[in-house]
Image: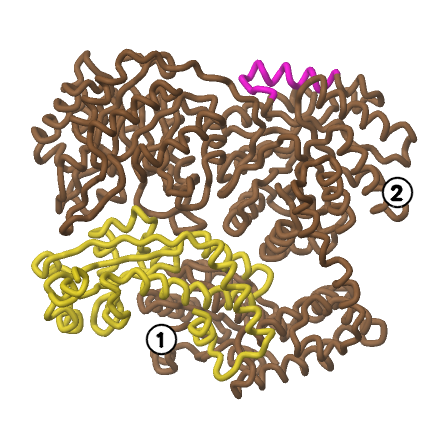
């Protein structure tokens, strides 16, 4: 049956689970064990007026079915047959796809690919349906895996609905703007809300959806809010009231209506009765430029946004070193700092000839998305890297970049179309960069027109009219600014610039950058790629927003600039590095260490000042005068001082000794203890290879052997995971690992450590340092 | 709550002003990033029977007329803040962690049925009550709806989540109807 989404009202059936009641077995198994029960429910909804019947496959995935004797394909094909048999020619059948019931990485342990495979298995088993309903999703990443699986394994229309809480958010944090941008980017045929709340609570979020969505909207609320009476769940809205709300939605812009938990054939009957003669409102195309991630979406509007430029190796020695050594934590640190400095989007460029860019990009994107809610700009010249990053990205990414070259457009536009990104377009082509604004505008037009032939709207393009160094030609800046204004005002497309290029080859670059940034903002710059850690650049941005009336009550400006004077005076107070470390005054450590490096050699500074100060704090900790946060504040301070030392040392490795492999064992995802140990070991100058959490024993063993580590340090928090610690140690011994093994973690004891053949049990981070000193010295 | 957070951090005696300030700031971050949710289900003693594994839980619920199983969580936002802090400032990270633990315990206590005292809560992992019951308990009360999942190791996600069994006695219910 052909479904005309958005043209006529469509009615999906109501709850299946509610009619089946509390069952001890998985309700999907009834499709095989008691098909009459399911057939009967389908019939009731069909007679109630539903013109789409939902298959009994909500939880029919390999994870939820693992406890049953049935395979995914058995349950799914039986369920599809039942629904089709009842529907006949009177109704369409939609394949129901619910959450997997297990959390995806980085929050949980399931990989994106495994989630995709599980959805794909269900979808492939559901041949013959008229559409697919991906529903009750509470995590955008899982939602993306499901939609991609549907797109790549079936060719029927896709409806995707999410379940929100009273604050309008998914459980993993996304708001509706993020959800809509993701789903529209992926090209679903209809989107909306189901479960979670009743129609009363849906109203506000329906209004929001209508304002931002260019796609048909589906609403399948519960029959009100749940109430527990004598241990039984009931819902607070009568079928009559439910129908009244649904009638309102139908006449105000919804296109697909149905019910979720607590709804019965009676709800659906009254709903279809009230709505059957309503002609749905036409869908209005919205021209919003949106990128998204786990949390809030970033919408390009009147207020310009900041794209942080710091995650990029170009011209950065320390960053290159971090990439080569796979020091992901350093790269993530750059991200966190830019977020707190006020960036709205982070550029991610990890291209370096000697590393595998694709692998590194995916890893950095995943790690960044585990701690930062900001959208990312995937910055790469390698199209395969771009494609893979777009696939594994959680949200709607900003892709950097395409340009006017035929080849580039042929490679990039299919990626943008498939995964739904916003793409940065550089105004250059086979003939290079035109000197005049007019030449760049022509290329911009060519790009926009070509994109349209791929089905990419201009709202998903941001034009970069290119900043050239003003030292190379005095008219360069003028042409860029003219192009900027024309593109924004006449072409109606958003703009972006890498601002700092303007000053290349000139002294005091920040002064020029700041002035050019102000001019660019005034000439229609929508997004500035800058260093958000530069107070001067952010000062320009904050001031622009105030002066152009984009900062109500100067709130943001006051928040960011009220403390300026105070900080200046604070940093003038003279404290010795030793005192700074003992007091844990991290912000003063770099400058103090840097000053001392004029008289001390790097190694002397570490051994004569930094380590003794840290030792003193450690002694205080051991006798209970200093507490953990204070010890760690001092350790963080030493770490900052170390950055100054590293910068000074010709070869960063000269101050590092030994090699310690650190990991939280497989199955265990609690890593705060491990990270404390890492910080302190590094403070004492040991080279630590941190393998992260939930690490399989084989990876630990392989790394220990190939790296010829002095010590392997393992952490486990739960009684259930010390088993995999034991297994890891056993394998290390089997592999004839020559170094020492040290263990720690909340549930471990000295005796237990001995019983699993560990060489040392560390009761806390300081004892781990002591042991390392003994072994490596 | 602050007192509990300090206790989790191992602070004995008076905390110095700088440390106290850190704890207060962290508690504020937790409060701003938490989206606390709770779910519970009431069982009859017979209905609860399949979850009464071991002697300790049987003792705990022996005079109960009903048994509530409740789960609360602070949500993923709190985990994200703790993880983020680990990337730049471990002192803040451990303090956030302690504050979140104090917060989730407090939230549970405030949501106890009939305002029962917190010592009546009994969680998997206490005494001989097996941790391995965690998934079944979560499933039985529909904790997936508020986003709580158990890993294979029976750790809960979001990490600041608590499940517990609470015995309800006849007099507790009378107390309520007064």
Q: What is the letter of the yellow chain?
A: B
The one of A150 and A121 positioned closer to us in this rendering: A150
Residue depth check, mark 1 versus mark 2: number of the one nearer the observer: 2
Q: What residue appears at the point 28 percent right and 33 percent down from the top-left corner?
A: A122
The residue range painted magenta reads: A442-458
* SS for dot 2: loop
Mark 1 Cα-neighbour bin, 10 Å: few <14, some 14–19, many ≥20 = some
Q: What is the letter of the brown chain?
A: A
Indicate left or right for B11 with A471 as reference: left
Q: Quadrant of the N terminus of chain A?
A: top left
In the image, residue A286 above or below residue A604: above
Q: Quadrant of residue A648?
A: bottom right
Residue at numbered disc 2 = A505
The image shows residue A159 at horizontal and vertical percentages of 35, 26
The image shows residue A175 at horizontal and vertical percentages of 46, 39
* SS for dot 1: loop
In the image, residue A52 above or below residue A653: above
Mark 2 Cα-neighbour bin, 10 Å: few <14, some 14–19, many ≥20 = few
Q: Chain of mark 1?
A: A
Residue at numbered disc 1 = A756
The image shows residue A700 at horizontal and vertical percentages of 46, 62
Q: What residue appears at the point 78 percent right and 60 percent down from the top-left corner?
A: A565
Indicate left or right for A414 with B49 as reference: right
């Amino acid at each position: 049956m052909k479904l005309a989404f958005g043209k006529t009202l469509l009615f999906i059936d109501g709850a299946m689970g509610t009619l089946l009641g509390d069952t001890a077995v998985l309700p999907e198994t009834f499709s095989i064990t008691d098909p009459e029960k399911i057939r009967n429910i389908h019939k009731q909804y069909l007679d109630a007026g539903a013109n789409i019947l939902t298959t009994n496959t909500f939880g029919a995935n390999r994870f939820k079915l693992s406890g049953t004797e049935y395979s995914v394909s058995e349950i799914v094909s039986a369920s599809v047959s039942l629904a089709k048999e009842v529907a006949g020619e009177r109704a369409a059948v939609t394949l129901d796809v619910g959450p997997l019931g297990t959390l995806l990485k980085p929050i949980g342990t399931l990989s994106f690919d495994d989630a995709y495979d599980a959805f794909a298995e269900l979808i492939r088993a559901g041949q013959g349906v008229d559409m697919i309903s991906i529903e009750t999703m509470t995590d955008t990443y899982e939602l993306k895996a499901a939609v991609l699986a549907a797109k790549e394994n079936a060719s029927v229309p896709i409806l995707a609905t999410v379940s929100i809480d009273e604050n309008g958010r998914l459980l993993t944090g996304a708001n509706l703007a993020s959800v809509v941008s993701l789903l529209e980017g992926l090209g679903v045929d209809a989107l909306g809300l189901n479960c979670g709340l009743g129609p009363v609570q849906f109203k506000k979020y329906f209004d929001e959806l209508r304002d931002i969505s260019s796609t048909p909207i589906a609403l399948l609320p519960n029959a009100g809010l749940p109430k527990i009476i004598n241990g039984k769940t009931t819902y607070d809205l009568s079928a009559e009231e439910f129908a009244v709300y649904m009638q309102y939605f139908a006449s105000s812009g919804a296109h697909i209506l149905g019910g979720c938990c607590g709804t019965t054939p009676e709800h659906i009957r009254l709903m279809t009765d009230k709505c059957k003669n309503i002609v749905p409102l036409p869908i209005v195309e919205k021209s919003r430029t949106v990128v998204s991630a786990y949390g809030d979406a970033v919408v390009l509007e009147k207020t310009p946004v900041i794209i942080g430029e710091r995650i990029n190796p170009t011209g950065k020695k320390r960053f290159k070193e971090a990439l080569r050594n796979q020091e992901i934590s350093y790269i993530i640190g750059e991200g966190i700092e830019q977020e707190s400095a006020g960036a709205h989007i982070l550029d991610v460029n990890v291209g370096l000839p000697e590393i595998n860019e694709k692998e590194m990009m995916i890893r950095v994107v995943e790690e960044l998305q585990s701690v930062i809610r900001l959208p990312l700009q995937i910055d790469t010249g390698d199209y395969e890297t771009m494609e893979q990053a777009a696939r594994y990205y959680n949200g709607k990414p900003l892709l950097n970049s395409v340009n006017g070259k035929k080849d580039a457009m042929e490679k990039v536009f299919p990626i943008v179309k498939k995964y739904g990104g916003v793409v940065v377009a550089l105004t250059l082509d086979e003939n290079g960069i035109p000197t005049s604004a007019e030449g760049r505008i022509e290329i911009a037009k060519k790009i926009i027109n070509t994109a349209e032939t791929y089905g990419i709207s201009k709202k998903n393009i941001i034009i970069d009219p290119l900043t050239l160094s003003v030292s190379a030609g005095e008219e360069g800046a003028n042409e860029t600014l003219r192009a900027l204004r024309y593109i924004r005002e006449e072409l109606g497309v958003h703009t972006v610039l890498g601002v700092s290029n303007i000053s290349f080859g000139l002294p005091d670059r920040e002064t020029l950058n700041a002035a050019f940034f102000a001019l660019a903002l005034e000439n229609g710059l929508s997004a500035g790629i800058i260093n958000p850690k530069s107070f001067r650049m952010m000062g320009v941005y904050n001031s622009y927003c105030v002066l152009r009336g984009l900062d109500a009550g100067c709130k943001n400006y006051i928040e960011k600039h009220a403390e300026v004077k105070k900080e200046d005076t604070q940093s003038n107070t003279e404290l010795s590095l030793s005192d700074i470390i003992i007091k844990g005054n991290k912000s003063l450590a770099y400058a103090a260490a840097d000053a001392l490096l004029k008289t001390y050699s790097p190694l002397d500074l570490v051994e004569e000042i930094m380590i003794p100060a840290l030792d003193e704090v450690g002694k205080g900790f051991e006798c209970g005068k200093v507490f953990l946060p204070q010890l760690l504040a001092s350790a963080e301070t030493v770490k900052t001082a170390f950055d100054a030392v590293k910068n000074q040392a010709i070869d960063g490795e000269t101050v590092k000794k030994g090699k310690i492999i650190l990991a939280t064992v497989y199955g265990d995802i609690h890593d705060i203890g491990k990270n404390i140990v890492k910080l302190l070991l590094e403070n004492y100058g040991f080279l630590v290879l941190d393998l992260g959490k939930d690490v399989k024993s084989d990876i630990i063993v392989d790394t220990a052997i190939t790296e010829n580590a002095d010590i392997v340090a393992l952490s486990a928090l739960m009684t259930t995971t010390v088993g995999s610690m034991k297994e890891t140690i056993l394998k290390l011994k089997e592999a004839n690992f020559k170094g020492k093994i040290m263990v720690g973690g909340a549930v471990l004891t000295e005796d237990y450590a001995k019983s699993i053949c560990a060489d040392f049990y560390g009761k806390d981070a300081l004892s781990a340092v002591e042991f390392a000193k003994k072994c490596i010295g | 709550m602050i007192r509990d957070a300090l206790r989790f951090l191992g602070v004995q005696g008076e905390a110095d002003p700088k440390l106290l300030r850190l704890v207060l700031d962290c508690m504020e971050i937790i409060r701003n990033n938490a989206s606390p949710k709770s779910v519970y289900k009431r069982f009859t003693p017979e209905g609860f029977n399949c979850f009464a594994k071991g002697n300790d839980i049987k003792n705990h619920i022996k005079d109960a007329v009903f048994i509530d199983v409740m789960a609360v969580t602070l949500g993923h936002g709190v985990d994200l803040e703790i993880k983020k802090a680990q990337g730049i400032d471990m002192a803040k990270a451990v303090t956030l962690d302690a504050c979140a633990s104090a917060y989730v315990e407090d939230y549970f206590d405030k949501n106890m049925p009939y305002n029962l005292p917190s010592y009546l809560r009994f969680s998997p992992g206490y005494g001989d009550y097996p941790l391995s019951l965690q998934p079944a308990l979560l499933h039985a009360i529909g904790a997936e709806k508020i986003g709580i999942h158990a890993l294979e190791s029976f750790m809960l996600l979001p990490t600041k989540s608590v499940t517990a069994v609470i015995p309800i006695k006849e007099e507790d219910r009378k107390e309520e109807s007064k």
